[in-house]
Structures are given as structure tokens and as C-alpha cells.
């Protein structure tokens, strides 16, 4: 029988920022933003960038216009109910076992159809890209959802640094492959490493971020430390965790779930209440922590921002 131990890498309840303090910080950010509105943009100090302190807490996070003000899913839930098959298939497994993942040193190699291929160390990523708070809905293909206050920065910021060439049409992502650290990779449940992909315009969309934290703290291992993708209008499986490689390509890259069962998981995976999964409906979802189900919104509620990316496409065919 599986004996459950508390995950030692998870913060103690006493270490979790109390919601009241957290909300206070947010209202401070809002006031600061209003106060700063009169200041010429050029004179804003660099300190207005989100930076991470040695204790793993981010400071000065910028708020985003994309943030939802819906009730946020508690830290405890976001970090104990996960999908991260490299650490097991149960929702509690990643929270229990992902501490075996070593996230330092860590680097992300970015190459392919780019003018300036580069390898970014995680410390440089944390230091040089302005970090924002992005409070997004996450809708899993399994018909549950959460509201998650990520810390991250637009993927476009990183891609622009390497200068995609005119031939680049897609972006491929790859998770670390190391079965010693990720015991799930010793099984043949999936074809490892986990891989994902986006069309270049999806990758460059301002909603698409690389996430490096959660609730103002560094990303917990079970949520994809030290750096993961977050694409809020797509089913959660597109948001690949613990990324080590990003490659610009001219052909649609293979993706783990589409390779595994193409009939059930498409490349696009846009949240769509009108296209059911072959084995269950996608029209409603359970927000974790709530009793009643709610309607699923097209593009997970981000239609105004992203529907234009798919003009003229039959989204039943390109699911
Ligand atoms: N990335 C990797 N490398 N391995 C995975 O198993 N699961 C995906 C996605 N990214 C997964 C992954 C799925 S199915 C979902 S719903 C989200 O991560 C879950 O993210 P969360 O655990 O932070 O909520």
C-alpha cells in the first residue's frame, strides 16, 4: 500500500503567504500602477521589473491586462493536484515525488530556424526577462479547471532575442530527459521526452508565457520547475513542463499526446465546448474546489484575444 508522506519540498502551511498579505501586495501594485501612470515611460526605473530574491520570492511583479479577477485556486490545491507523468500517473504523485528533479543548474537551448541560436541559463532568464504576474484560467482536457496566479514573461520576448528567420513557422518544445530524476521515463507509458508545439503566431501571442513561478514564488517542481509553457486558451496538456529545448521549425512538430492517440488529441487543442473528446463531453467543467459544474467557454474565455488566429479554419477538423 502506498504510504503518503508530506512532500518536504512543499512549503509548510506557515510559509505560505497568507492570502490577506498577498491581496494587500496586489492592491499595492494596483495603486502603484495608477500613481505611476503620470510618469513618462522612459523614466521608469528598471526596479519595476519583477525580480527574484534569494529566498525564491518575486518582488515588483508587474500586473497584466490579461489577468482574471476570478477567485484563485489555493496554493495547496495547485501543488497537490497535478499532471506530470514523468513522476507518476496519479494526481498526487508529482507533489510527492517531483522533489527528485534537480532544477539547478538548468539551461534552455533555443535554436533551429533562428539567426542567433542561444543557450539561456535559468538564472539569466530570471534576471533579464521582466517577470509579470499572469492570473490565468487553466482548463485541463480532463474537464477540470483552476485559476492560477503564474509568474512569467511572454515567450515572444525570448523568441525575439534569437531572431526567428522568415522560414520559421512552428515552435517545438522538449522536456528534460533523465530517467534517473524522472522515474516515469523508465516506463513506456509515453514516448519520452514529452514534446509539444505551437504555430509561430500562437507562440508570439502576448497571452503565451513561459512560467517561472506561482503565487509570487519560484515554480514548485511538480508544476514544471524551473520553466514551463503556459498557453491559457488551449487544453492544459499543451503547457509543457520543465523545458530544456526550444526549436524553431518549418514543419508542424510532433507532440506527445497527438502521437499517442491522434484521434483523441489534436495538435491545436484549443479549448472548445463544441468539440467533444471521443470519450467525454467538453461542454462543461469542474472548477476544482467547486461543487457545481460550469459551462466551458470557447478558447477558455480568451476568444476576444485569440479567435482571430484561426479565422477560416474548421476547428472541428483542426481540434
Ligand atoms: N508536461 C510534461 N512534461 N509532462 C506532463 O505529463 N502534463 C500536462 C501539462 N504539461 C504534462 C506536462 C497536462 S495533461 C496538464 S493538465 C498540465 O501540465 C498540468 O499542469 P499543472 O500540474 O501545473 O496544473
Image (cartoon, grey):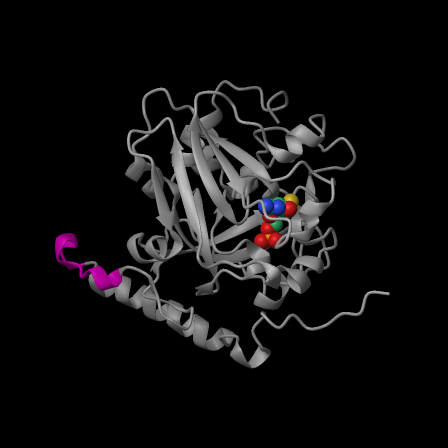
Q: Position of residue 11 (x, y in %)?
A: 56, 73
Residue 285 visible in the snapshot: no
Work out whether residue 141 can be spotted.
yes
Q: Is residue 43 magenta?
A: yes
Q: Nearer the viewer, residue 2 or 264?
A: 2
Q: Is residue 136 above or below residue 192?
A: below
Provide residue 91's location: percent of width, then percent of height: 71, 56
Please tell me which residue is depicted at 52% across the width and 49% down the height of the picture: 242
Quadrant of the image occupied by residue 297: top right
Residue at 48% x, 64% y is 215
Q: Between 196 and 27, which is closer to the camera in this rendering?
A: 196
Q: Nearer the viewer, residue 240 or 143?
A: 240
Q: Is residue 303 left or right of residue 143?
A: left
User: At which x and y percent is residue 287?
Assistant: 65, 54
Number of dots carrying numbers: 0
Question: Seen from this angle, which residue lies furthest front?
Answer: 180
What segment carries the magenta color? 38-48
Residue 186, percent from left and from top: 71, 46
Amino acid at each position: 500500500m502506498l504510504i503518503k508522506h508530506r512532500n518536504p519540498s512543499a512549503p509548510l502551511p506557515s510559509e505560505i503567504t497568507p492570502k490577506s498579505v498577498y491581496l494587500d501586495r496586489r492592491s499595492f501594485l494596483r495603486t502603484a500602477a495608477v500613481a505611476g501612470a503620470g510618469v513618462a515611460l522612459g523614466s521608469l526605473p528598471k526596479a519595476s521589473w519583477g525580480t527574484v530574491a534569494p529566498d525564491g520570492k518575486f518582488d515588483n511583479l508587474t500586473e497584466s491586462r490579461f489577468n482574471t479577477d476570478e477567485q484563485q485556486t489555493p496554493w495547496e490545491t495547485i501543488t497537490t493536484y497535478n499532471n506530470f507523468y514523468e513522476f507518476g500517473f496519479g494526481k498526487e504523485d508529482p507533489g510527492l515525488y517531483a522533489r527528485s528533479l534537480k532544477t539547478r543548474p538548468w539551461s534552455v537551448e533555443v535554436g533551429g530556424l533562428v539567426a542567433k541560436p542561444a543557450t539561456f541559463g535559468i538564472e539569466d532568464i530570471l534576471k533579464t526577462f521582466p517577470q509579470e504576474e499572469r492570473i490565468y484560467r487553466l482548463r485541463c482536457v480532463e474537464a477540470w479547471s483552476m485559476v492560477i496566479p503564474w509568474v512569467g514573461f511572454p515567450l515572444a520576448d525570448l523568441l525575439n532575442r534569437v531572431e526567428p528567420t522568415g522560414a520559421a513557422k512552428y515552435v517545438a518544445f522538449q522536456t528534460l530527459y533523465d530517467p534517473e530524476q524522472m522515474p516515469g521515463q523508465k516506463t513506456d507509458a509515453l514516448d519520452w521526452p514529452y514534446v509539444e508545439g505551437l504555430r509561430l503566431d500562437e507562440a508570439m501571442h502576448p497571452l503565451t508565457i513561459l512560467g517561472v513561478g506561482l503565487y509570487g514564488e519560484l515554480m514548485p517542481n511538480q508544476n514544471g520547475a524551473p520553466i514551463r509553457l503556459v498557453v491559457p486558451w488551449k487544453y492544459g496538456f499543451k503547457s509543457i513542463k520543465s523545458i530544456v529545448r526550444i526549436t524553431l521549425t518549418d514543419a508542424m512538430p510532433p507532440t506527445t499526446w497527438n502521437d499517442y492517440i491522434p484521434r483523441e488529441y489534436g495538435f491545436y487543442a484549443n479549448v472548445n465546448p463544441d468539440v467533444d473528446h471521443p470519450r467525454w463531453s467538453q461542454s462543461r467543467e469542474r472548477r476544482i474546489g467547486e461543487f457545481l459544474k460550469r459551462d466551458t467557454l470557447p478558447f477558455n474565455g480568451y476568444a476576444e484575444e485569440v479567435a482571430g488566429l484561426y479565422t477560416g479554419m474548421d476547428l472541428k477538423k483542426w481540434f
